Amino acid sequence: MARGSLLLAVNQGIILVLSMVVIGALVGAGALGNDVVVGLAQNQLGLGLASGLAIVCLGLFLDRVTQGRRAPRA
């Protein structure tokens, strides 16, 4: 019975972590967010946009995976 609620909690946790990736790069943490910050700071628009798009795609993919199956509507 709690499966839906647990999947929602995991989903929200993953999305929160991905939203903090770029902010973490601003304070010195290394990750994909570091490429976004470096690319935009050094006027390398391609690197910044490609890294940002990768984060967005990863977020969309993980969001769809952790949503679980929905009951068909009548």
Image: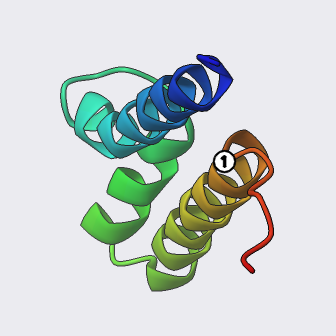
For label 1, the SS is loop
Nearer the observer, 50 or 42 = 50
Quadrant position of the N terminus in the picture: top right
* 65 up-or-down from 61: above or below: above
Instruction: Give the image quarter of residue 64.
Output: bottom right
The residue sitting at 50% across, 51% down in the picture is 35
The residue sitting at 66% across, 47% down in the picture is 67
Nearer the observer, 62 or 22 = 62
Q: Which residue is mark 1?
A: 67
Q: Is residue 32 left or right of residue 38?
A: right
* 58 up-or-down from 40: above or below: above
The residue sitting at 80% across, 69% down in the picture is 72
The residue sitting at 77% across, 58% down in the picture is 71
Rendering coords of residue 9 (x, y %): 46, 25
**What coloring was used for the rendering?**
rainbow
Rendering coords of residue 74 (x, y %): 75, 80
Residue type indicated by callout 1: Gln
Rendering coords of residue 53 (x, y %): 58, 72
Nearer the observer, 68 or 39 = 68
